Image (spheres, rainbow, N blue to C red):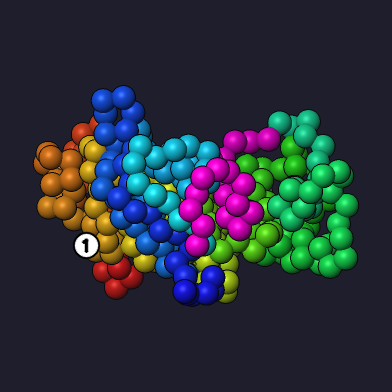
């Protein structure tokens, strides 16, 4: 049997997700290897977030099996999985300090008040430094910008040294500087700790240079492969069952004409694919 360090952090086998008579996807086999970053793309309603919830044990697949770090997923609660949810600004009257938010990633599973144990404060300080948040570590999080809050959420998700990281639209509504900071944190963790990453996004641009493979969900089907093999007019046209055009514009790849989807923009550089 493979050790936890070399075994795939995530294995999805013959999985299907249905909503009533509608099939979002089926027959999905996916293995996320240690240190691999896979981006999940597709229109709204294609089951991207539900896939993450199923991996977390919060939703059930219609068919198939999910294995996380050698254990079949039956219910929620695997502490070895880091999760970055969709960004929602915290209320301005939230008095919790920035460092307290990160600390919850270390001891949020323990009962009682989050008093740091020996060595934990140094770990939290290191995470705050990685998030470029040291200067506002003791400020109330409600007074921080959306980008600053999101960097803290990433630090919180990484606090327990997860071997699998799930990120649900972690870059939405962030400016370029904060997008780069978030991507840098995720990429550093997966390379340093050999963690697998499954990252849902509507825009591949900020992460394409880091992505190993893309899983594209659409119209009840999927395509899985390297960016250069998936983000092509013929592949996406076959996936949607309609004409989809891929254009190069200003160093970006633009996907146009995908039914039931907003126009999506994907940066394309063959040397990084």
Q: Residue at x 50, y 62 (%)?
A: 70
Q: Is residue 150 left or right of residue 102?
A: left
**Magenta part of the chain:** 70-90
Q: Nearer the viewer, residue 15 or 107?
A: 15
Which x, y percent locates residue 150?
Answer: 62, 47
Which x, y percent locates residue 197?
Answer: 48, 60
Toward the top, the furthest residue is: 20
> Is residue 73 on the magenta stretch?
yes
Q: Residue at x 75, y 48 (%)?
A: 108
Depicted 65 relative to depicted 186: above or below: above
Q: How many marks?
A: 1
Q: Nearer the viewer, residue 56 or 215?
A: 56
Toward the front, the furthest residue is: 1
Depicted 167 relative to depicted 93: above or below: below
Magenta span dominant secondary structure: loop
Which x, y percent locates residue 123?
Answer: 77, 65
Circle 1 crowding by C-alpha within 10 Å: few under 14, some 14–19, many from 20? some
Q: Nearer the viewer, residue 38 or 255?
A: 38
Query: Element type at marker 1?
Result: helix
Q: Is residue 134 left or right of residue 147?
A: right
Depicted 243 relative to depicted 193: above or below: above
Task: Say whether residue 125 is visible.
Answer: no
Q: Residue at x 74, y 32 (%)?
A: 92
Q: Residue at x 31, y 55 (%)?
A: 29
> Is residue 72 on the magenta stretch?
yes
Which x, y percent locates residue 219?
Answer: 23, 37
Task: Say whether residue 93 is visible.
Answer: yes
**Quadrant in which the C terminus appears:** bottom left
Q: Which residue is mark 1?
A: 229
């Amino acid at each position: 049997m493979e050790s936890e360090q070399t075994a795939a952090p995530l294995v999805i086998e013959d999985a299907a997700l249905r909503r009533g008579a509608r099939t979002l996807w089926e027959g999905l086999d996916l293995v996320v290897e240690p240190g691999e970053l896979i981006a999940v793309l597709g229109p709204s309603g294609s089951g991207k977030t539900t896939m993450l919830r199923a991996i977390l044990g919060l939703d059930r697949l219609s068919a198939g099996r999910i294995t996380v770090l050698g254990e079949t997923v039956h219910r929620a609660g695997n502490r070895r999985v880091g999760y970055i949810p969709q960004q929602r600004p915290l209320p301005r009257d939230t008095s919790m300090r920035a460092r307290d938010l990160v600390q919850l990633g270390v001891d949020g599973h323990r009962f009682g008040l989050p008093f740091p144990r020996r060595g934990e404060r140094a770990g939290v300080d290191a995470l705050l430094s990685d998030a470029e948040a040291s200067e506002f570590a003791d400020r109330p999080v409600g007074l921080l910008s959306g980008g600053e809050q999101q960097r803290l959420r990433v630090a919180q998700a990484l606090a327990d040294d997860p071997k699998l990281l799930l990120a649900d639209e972690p870059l939405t509504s962030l400016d370029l500087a904060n997008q780069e900071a978030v991507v840098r944190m995720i990429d550093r963790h997966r390379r340093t700790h050999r963690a697998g990453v499954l990252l849902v996004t509507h825009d591949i641009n900020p992460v394409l240079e880091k992505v190993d493979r893309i899983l594209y969900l659409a119209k009840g089907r999927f395509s899985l492969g390297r960016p250069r093999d998936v983000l092509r007019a013929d592949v996406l046209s076959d996936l949607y069952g309609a004409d989809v055009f891929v254009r190069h514009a200003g160093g970006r790849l633009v996907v146009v004409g995908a039914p039931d989807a907003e126009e999506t923009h994907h940066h394309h550089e063959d040397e990084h694919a």
